[in-house]
Amino acid sequence: MVLTSSPLSPSPFDQTVLLTNSDKDIHPLSVSSTIHTIVYPNEKEMLLGFRDFLIKYDPDLLTGYDLCEEISEILDRAKDLNLPKSFPYLARPSSTSLKPRSRQTYNASWVRAQRRMAGTSNREYIELGCTGRLVLDMRQVMEKEERLRTYSLNEANEHVLGKKLEFLSATTIAKLSASDELDDKRRVADYAVKRAWAGLEIMRKNASLVSAVEMARVFGLNFQEVFMGQMRRMWGYDSVPRAN
């Protein structure tokens, strides 16, 4: 996780928090000047620590690349591990549960054929439903604003920032995590932290938060509606008094 009070530019108060159930010495390499590593005895404790940390820090904005999908997977994993039913209560106030919902948008040819007002990309995505916090999923932003081939984080990072990210498959990550070599575990930690930072840097480079807030303000939309990719009909009524 990256904690910041500056959504527009790097700040000396930016912090990186790495939650792990591995070795405490897997401190990532030079990604951020301030890195805190918190080690838990097992995966259950790590997920509970993640929830407690989020509630305590109480952020106004949650952002990242494919953020909604990843948090939805964390909630599913919490169910698999039989964590307390209070685990999904990550919204604001903390007595409110997250309510992830699957949404579908469709490509332009389907829209024309069916004569419906819908989105411009044929993809199923997750709407997080986080009451009291703004949610800015940078993948949804990139799909709305840019024309890329795959919309992977690696491609988006190279397109926006001009830098390449290392890619590790799930199999490789599992193998490195299970290794007894400290350098292998450090590589995984470094990989995770760099990807977290990449999502934040893409948001800063594109000024995505400012653009979304301004669009919501001008068109009278809910913040999340800005990224739904749907056309909305707006009606205005102006009452002009008749002259006698």
Image (cartoon, rainbow, N blue to C red):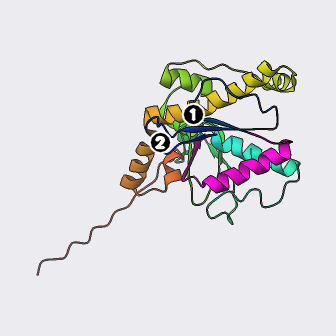
Residue at 67%, 63% in the rendered image: 94
Identify which amino acid the numbered label 1 is placed on.
Gly
Residue at 76%, 22% in the rendered image: 169
**Could you tell me which quadrant the C terminus lies in?**
bottom left
In the image: residue 155, left or right of residue 223: right
Residue position for label 2 = 7
Front residue of this view, candidates 185 and 233: 185
Instruction: Kindly report which numbered mark, 1 or 2, lies closer to the viewer in this rendering.
Output: 2
Q: Which residues are magenta?
A: 38-63
**Could you tell me which quadrant the N terminus lies in?**
top right
Camera sees residue 75: no
Residue 138 position, x and y percent, is 56, 38
Q: Is residue 200 magenta?
A: no
Q: Point out which mark residue 31 bears.
A: none
Residue 194 position, x and y percent, is 62, 27
Camera sees residue 211: yes
Residue placed furthest toward the left = 244
Residue 221 position, x and y percent, is 45, 56
Question: Secondary structure beneath disc 2?
Answer: loop
Badge 2: how crowded within 10 Å, few (<14), some, or many (20+)?
Answer: some
| Count of numbered circles on the image | 2
Front residue of this view, candidates 215 and 97: 97
Residue at 46%, 40% in the rendered image: 208
In the image: residue 167, left or right of residue 107: right
Identify which amino acid the numbered label 2 is placed on.
Pro
Question: Secondary structure beneath disc 1?
Answer: helix
Residue position for label 1 = 199
Badge 1: how crowded within 10 Å, few (<14), some, or many (20+)?
Answer: many
Residue 232 position, x and y percent, is 46, 53
